[in-house]
Image: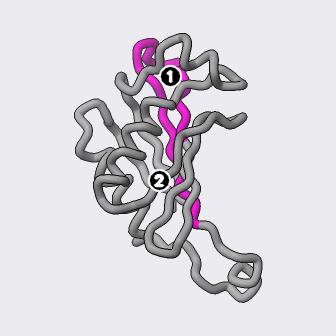
């Protein structure tokens, strides 16, 4: 699983959208931005849903499925700024995991697309990739 973290003053969700998340976590607009960008690059993406830890959607590049999640949390050091997290997880079968096949490598294509989308956004700063 790859984790991309950054600071942002964008992607803020309106109160009614936040209320739709079981834990009132922001990140829907970030998920929508990434989903739309992935779709534009030929990645098939499902609708966005809420989860305990934020917002998520499934994606597929060729035959390879992925699970993407997003969340925005307040930055205690900067009241107007949010800390954002994006996780990109490549689904692998139990057999692949046991045999150490098909791992998610640092040059994963879906992670690269997500990273490029974030780098191109003017309200993303201090982007870090933990691969």
Viewer-proximal residue among 112 and 59: 59
Disc 1 marks which residue? 75
Determine whether label 1 and label 2 are within 8 Å by CB. no
Q: Residues within 10 Å of mark 2 (few under 14, many from 20)?
A: many
Quadrant of the drawing holding the N terminus: bottom right
Disc 2 marks which residue? 45
Task: Answer above or below: position of 53 versus 14.
Answer: below
> Which residue occupies 53% across, 11% down?
15
Real-space Cα separation, disc 1 to disc 2, in angstroms: 29 Å
In the displayed structure image, the side of residue 94 where residue 19 appears, left or right = left
Magenta span contains residue 25 = no
Task: Give the mark, 1 or 2, whose residue is nearer the N terminus.
Answer: 2
> Which residue occupies 68% across, 37% down?
51
Q: How crowded is mark 1: few (under 14 residues within 10 Å), some or many (20 or more)?
A: some
Residue 86: % across, % down? 50, 45
Front disc: 1 or 2: 2
Viewer-proximal residue among 128 and 64: 64
> Which residue occupies 53% across, 58% down?
2
In the displayed structure image, the side of residue 33 where residue 88 appears, left or right = right
Residue 91: % across, % down? 62, 67
In the displayed structure image, the side of residue 123 where residue 4 appears, left or right = right
Q: Find residue 97 and report its image quarter.
A: bottom right
Q: Is mark 1 on a helix, strand or loop?
A: strand
> Which residue occupies 65% across, 25% down?
21
Residue 78: % across, % down? 43, 17
Residue 104: % across, % down? 54, 72
Q: What element carries label 2?
A: strand
Q: Find residue 108 and report its image quarter.
A: bottom left
Q: Is the magenta stretch mostly helix, strand or loop?
A: strand
Q: How many marks?
A: 2
Residues in magenta, as a range: 70-90
């Amino acid at each position: 699983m790859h984790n991309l973290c950054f600071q942002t003053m964008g992607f803020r969700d309106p109160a009614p959208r936040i209320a739709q998340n079981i834990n009132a976590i922001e990140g829907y607009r970030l998920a929508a931005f990434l989903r739309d960008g992935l779709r534009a690059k030929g990645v098939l993406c499902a609708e966005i849903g809420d989860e305990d830890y934020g917002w998520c959607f499934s994606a597929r590049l060729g035959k390879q499925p992925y699970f993407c999640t997003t969340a925005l949390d307040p930055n205690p050091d900067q009241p107007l700024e949010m800390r954002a997290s994006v996780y990109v997880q490549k689904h692998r079968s139990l057999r692949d995991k046991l045999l150490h096949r098909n791992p998610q490598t640092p040059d994963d294509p879906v992670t690269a697309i997500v990273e490029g989308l974030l780098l191109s956004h003017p309200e993303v700063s201090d982007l870090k990739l933990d691969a």
